[in-house]
Image: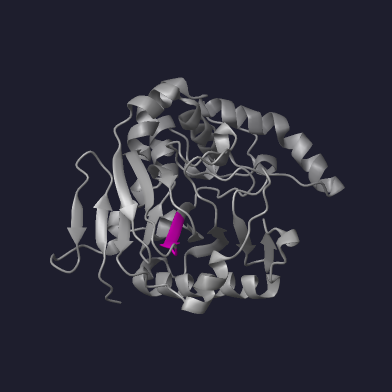
Amino acid sequence: MTIPFQAFMTDAESTRYNSASEALAHPATYLEQGGILYFEHSPFGFSDEDRDFLLNQKQLESPRHKNIAYKPHLDKLTGIDQRAGVDTLRLKAVLKSYSEKTTQFLDEFLSPYRNHRSLDYTSFRPLEEEGRVLRLRARNDLLHVDSFPTRPTYGKRILRVFTNIHPTKVRVWKTSDNFEVLAHRFKGQMRPLSGQLERSDKTSLRQRLSHALGLKQSNQSPYDRWMMDFHNFLKENADFQAQARKATWEFPPHSGWMVYTDMVSHSVLSGQYALEQTFLIDPEAQLLPEKAPIEILKDLYGYPTSTLRTAEHQLPEQIPV
């Protein structure tokens, strides 16, 4: 599938590659090394009527919902303001259509991932990011790498596809060093990974009891907890936020882009009306599997990936030391 794109590398060189004028490697290699694939005209667009409909939607003002979300596996919407008289059936149909179009595009454009990806949430972000008031760990304007507090990935990569549907305003991001650089830099300030493994061992009985009683449980792996701690650590690290090297990227109206947000440290400074589809990609399907965060943590701490991705109540009795 031939689609013109640019690859914005987010390393210290901030190199840009243009598929229209250069012979490039497979697009996935740029993503996996911490690049942003940018499309001047979103290849997963939709009709003007659907865009106008979305521009008039209201989000529920609640700390529990950062965006309006469509959950494809449940065919369910969250974060909508029912008091605004939202046409939920049409909103669901529009977001479902975006999800289907981005999935079709991904399967063709990044064909190595076709049989190795899981569909996660679709989100619509109708609120202006600049000046948005959120609790610190939920703020989008602070540099971070992504991890989900309630949806463990067990080492799968977080690939996100975005479209700016604002009619006139750019969406502004900043990026800094990638996960590999930051994990090495801050290893000494993080909770040891052995502590995450011990925590799993101690809580496994509680997890089994919760499961037996039918109670909701996160069932996170040591990998997921370390990544969540790292997400929070970066946002709470005032020195890092102030002194980190930063590059600025502007995504104009009607443009699209995709990025591994568990690899690229990023923040959103401004912008309104964006669509996003999240995919979880198996590291084994990657062209550069050694760049996956779980592989980086394996090399950093010396634990096998099978141990890092094991759910709490499934941990082996013997933990390597």
Is residue 164 on the magenta stretch?
yes
Residue 34 seen in this snapshot: no
Residue 64 picture quarter: top right
Residue lying furthest right in this view? 213
Residue at the spot 56% in from the left edge and 59% down from the top edge: 123
Relative horizontal placement of residue 238, taking residue 137 as reference (left or right): left
Residue 71 seen in this snapshot: yes
Q: Position of residue 242 (x, y in %)?
A: 37, 26
Residue at the spot 44% in from the left edge and 62% down from the top edge: 166
Coloration mode: one colour
Residue at the spot 45% in from the left edge and 57% down from the top edge: 160
Q: Position of residue 30 (x, y in %)?
A: 28, 55
The segment highlighted magenta reads 159-165
Residue nearest the viewer, comparing 211 with 254: 254
In this rendering, the count of numbered labels is 0
Q: Position of residue 306 (x, y in %)?
A: 52, 45
Is residue 138 on the magenta stretch?
no
**In the rendered view of the protein, which quadrant contains the N terminus?**
bottom left
Type of secondary structure dominating the magenta stretch: strand
Relative horizontal placement of residue 311, taking residue 306 as reference (left or right): right
Q: Position of residue 141 (x, y in %)?
A: 46, 39
Residue nearest the viewer, comparing 112 with 278: 278
